[in-house]
Image: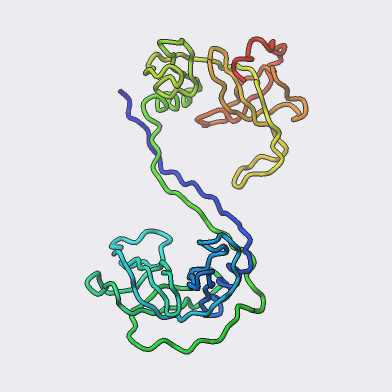
Amino acid sequence: MPEVLKAPLVVEFPFTRSLGPVQSAFLTGLRERVVLGVRASDGRVLVPPAEYDPVTAEEIRDLVEVAPTGTVTTWAWNHAPRRGQPLTTPFAWVLVRLDGADTALLHALDAPGADAVHTGMRVRIRWAEERTGAITDIACFEPYDGEPPQLTGSTGEFEDPVTGIVAAARLDYTYSPGRAQTAYINALGGRRTVGERCPSCRKVYVPPRGACPTCGVATDEQVEVGPRGTVTTFCIVNIKAKNLDIEVPYVYAHIALDGAGLALHGRIGGIPYDEVRMGLRVEPVWTEGGRYPDHYRPTGEPDADYDTYRELL
């Protein structure tokens, strides 16, 4: 059996969101070294602040300044910090109830070791040297045994308030395609497209999954399909993707390769985008050293009859 492939992959999505008056005041306050909470209908001060009352679900905007000092309510030791976490050395994740607040804020505590951390210990905010109006303006918490400092008396009104943030979501993982798709990828390296036939319904799946999703039985009979195929459906792409050197507009299509029981994705080239159509017959175009088709182009054959691909839409 050939070696199963694996490769490191990263999925990133920078999510941009606008801020309402409460979150705007909270993050702008952090930029100015001020911590603001919001008073709920039951009188509790919520930090971090919520935009809607957790009891009544009504909008709340009664901002309240709290102290940058507080008490650890619970904690967990992080002995191996990961990329992007607040500290690069071992630290504690802590829930801190700031003085004047009734709920706890999650953040990092810089401590020399786990034996230096305990529930009930007093801490204070260590502010980041450069602050932009984000939760990272709190660099971390640190142990503190002094009195709470005097509040600034802020009402939440600031010059140049923060109105939006970009939250970068990222997932690093190792992907293994498994036996079936490893064989599929290796075949592409030889400019061949290989699927697997279901022993029950006889449908050929490309790319293969190792099992038939309809019948629920394992597949291991390899079948070479294509290389030509038929466009079943398509879309015109008008927005240029990051790190993709393809000029817009271009066409991305479902292509049913000859002999396959499932359409796969591919870009259509060699034809004006507004001339691509359902039933268009296409063939793969490979680049030098490419491990998969760069795009598909028209073969010049007559269009396929709709009845020959309608079950593959």
Query: Where 113 falls versus 54 (above or below)?
Result: below
In this view, the residue farthest toward the left is 115
The reply, left or right, for residue 90 in relation to residue 240 is left
Is 154 in front, or is 4?
154
Residue at (38%, 72%) from the top-left corner?
Answer: 96
Is 89 in front, or is 122?
122
Query: Where 17 falls versus 215 (above or below)?
Result: below
Give the image quarter of residue 111. bottom left
Work out which quarter of the rendered image holds the N terminus and state it: top left
Work out which quarter of the rendered image holds the C terminus and state it: top right
Give the image quarter of residue 93. bottom left
Is 19 in front, or is 311?
19
Is 192 in front, or is 164?
164
Rendered location of residue 225, percent (x, y): 52, 15
Residue at (40%, 21%) from the top-left corner?
Answer: 211
Residue at (28%, 62%) from the top-left corner?
Answer: 79
The reply, left or right, for residue 25 in relation to residue 103 is right
The reply, left or right, for residue 92 in relation to residue 238 is left
Query: Where 264 falls versus 27 (above or below)?
Result: above
Rendered location of residue 213, percent (x, y): 45, 22
Rendered location of residue 287, percent (x, y): 57, 30
Rendered location of residue 130, percent (x, y): 52, 76
